Image (tube, helix red, strand yellow):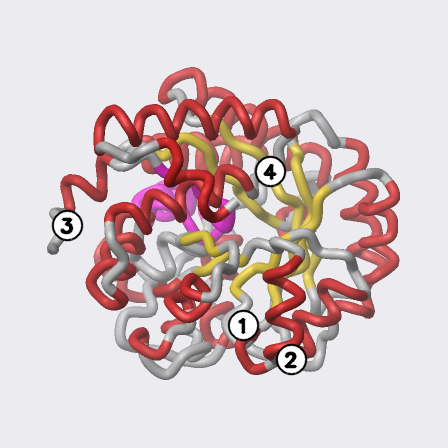
């Protein structure tokens, strides 16, 4: 049975894997470039959009990441970060997103003298304004970068500790995966875990299951970003399943980075059928030209996920959020009640895949 897009848009949504710098409106990039007198590779919105978006120009993860310096060039002031954080909340509110975890690396926003602390404060202000105006709750995940020295990750881990409970909900390791192992950054994760902070790591996207193994057993990750190649190690996959470690799946992005050769070969359905905790996310809304509604549509059209399955993704995401248990429980209950009242989801269904 085909699900209409307006139904998918109305579904309450939760997103755990969304990069702030990869989700900026092209109009805003041009406006910021003009006000900051920064030369950009295009002077009109449509041309800039074509440069930033992958479209049919699929490449490696490194090719995907090459677009970010353009966006980062205009995100070196507190005002610019506050603005894009607010605008992202406004954008996602239009598809009934109830909670989102936004990740970014403060170290990438210090080119013009802004401190890493100022960057967090600016994003917090933007997110809070967005929550007040649109009702979307959010949390910040600070990212270390694999190909930047581990000493910087340690500095960012310390920043995360200082902002724990003050808008920051977790720590991540992102960036080029091959030749930059997570274990090199384990000291940062020791600090994170020793301060009882949640961690997620990009792993198994451009490199094999050994990358996921390091994320879990060297760095203590509580969630895995992507995990596309987890299926290549059945024993490790069983471990992930047994310990209910959530996977932050990003379908369109995985296709764009050649993590899968075709969307129909993506392992999301296999993982779901095996009972793994699977969530659906956008990764980079601008670069991949997508929304969470679009990702739900792809999941339905390509893999035959039903409305109940899509509801399960949302409940799983809310249960996997880096929030205190009491907050997760309250928000899960609220979303479940909306799903039941608006779409007929039975409460007992929600508990089947906890």
Q: Which residues are magenta?
A: 13-37
Q: State the image coordinates of residue 74 (x, y, percent, origin top left).
A: 49, 48
Instruction: Measure the alpha-carbon separation of dots 4 and 3.
Output: 32 Å
Q: Quadrant of the N terminus?
A: bottom left
Mark 4 / mark 3, whichever is N-terminal: 3
Which labelled disc corresponds to residue 3?
Answer: 3
Q: Are marks 2 and 4 in contact (CB under 8 Å)?
A: no
Instruction: Measure the alpha-carbon separation of dots 3 and 1.
Output: 29 Å
Instruction: Measure the alpha-carbon separation of dots 1 and 4.
Output: 22 Å
Mark 3 / mark 2, whichever is N-terminal: 3
> In the rendered image, which residue does mark 4 sit on?
140
Near-viewer residue (224 or 258): 224
Is residue 267 left or right of 140 when viewed as pictured? left
Q: Is residue 302 above or below residue 70?
A: below
The reply to whether residue 35 is in sight is no
Near-viewer residue (177 or 205): 205
């Amino acid at each position: 049975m085909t699900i209409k897009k307006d139904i998918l848009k109305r579904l309450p949504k939760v997103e755990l894997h969304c990069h702030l710098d990869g989700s900026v409106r092209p109009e805003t990039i041009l406006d910021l470039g003009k006000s900051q007198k920064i030369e950009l590779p295009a002077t009109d919105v449509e041309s800039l959009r074509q440069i930033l978006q992958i479209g049919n120009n699929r490449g490696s993860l490194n090719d995907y990441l090459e677009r970010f310096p353009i966006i980062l060039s205009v995100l070196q002031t507190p005002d610019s970060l506050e603005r894009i954080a607010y605008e992202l909340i406004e954008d996602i509110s239009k598809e009934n997103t109830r909670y989102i975890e936004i990740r970014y690396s403060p170290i990438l926003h210090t080119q013009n003298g802004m401190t890493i602390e100022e960057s967090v404060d600016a994003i917090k202000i933007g997110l809070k304004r967005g929550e007040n105006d649109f009702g979307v709750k959010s949390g910040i995940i600070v990212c270390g970068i694999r190909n930047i020295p581990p000493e910087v990750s340690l500095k960012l881990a310390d920043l995360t500790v200082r902002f724990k409970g003050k808008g920051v909900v977790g720590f991540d390791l992102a960036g080029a995966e091959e030749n930059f192992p997570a274990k090199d950054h384990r000291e940062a994760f020791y600090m994170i875990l020793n301060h009882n902070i949640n961690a997620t790591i990009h792993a198994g996207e451009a490199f094999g299951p050994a990358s996921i193994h390091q994320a879990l057993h060297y760095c203590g990750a509580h969630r895995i970003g992507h995990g596309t190649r987890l299926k290549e190690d059945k024993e490790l996959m069983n471990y992930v399943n047994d310990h209910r470690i959530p996977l932050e799946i990003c379908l369109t992005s995985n296709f764009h980075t050649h993590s899968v050769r075709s969307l129909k070969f993506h392992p999301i359905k296999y993982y779901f059928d095996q009972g793994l905790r699977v969530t659906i996310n956008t990764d980079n809304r601008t670069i991949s030209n997508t929304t969470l509604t679009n990702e739900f549509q792809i999941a339905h059209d390509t893999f035959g996920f039903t409305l109940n399955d899509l509801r399960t993704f949302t409940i799983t995401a809310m249960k996997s959020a880096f929030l205190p248990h009491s907050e997760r429980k309250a928000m899960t209950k609220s979303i479940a009640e909306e799903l039941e009242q608006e779409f007929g989801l039975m409460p007992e269904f929600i508990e089947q895949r906890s």
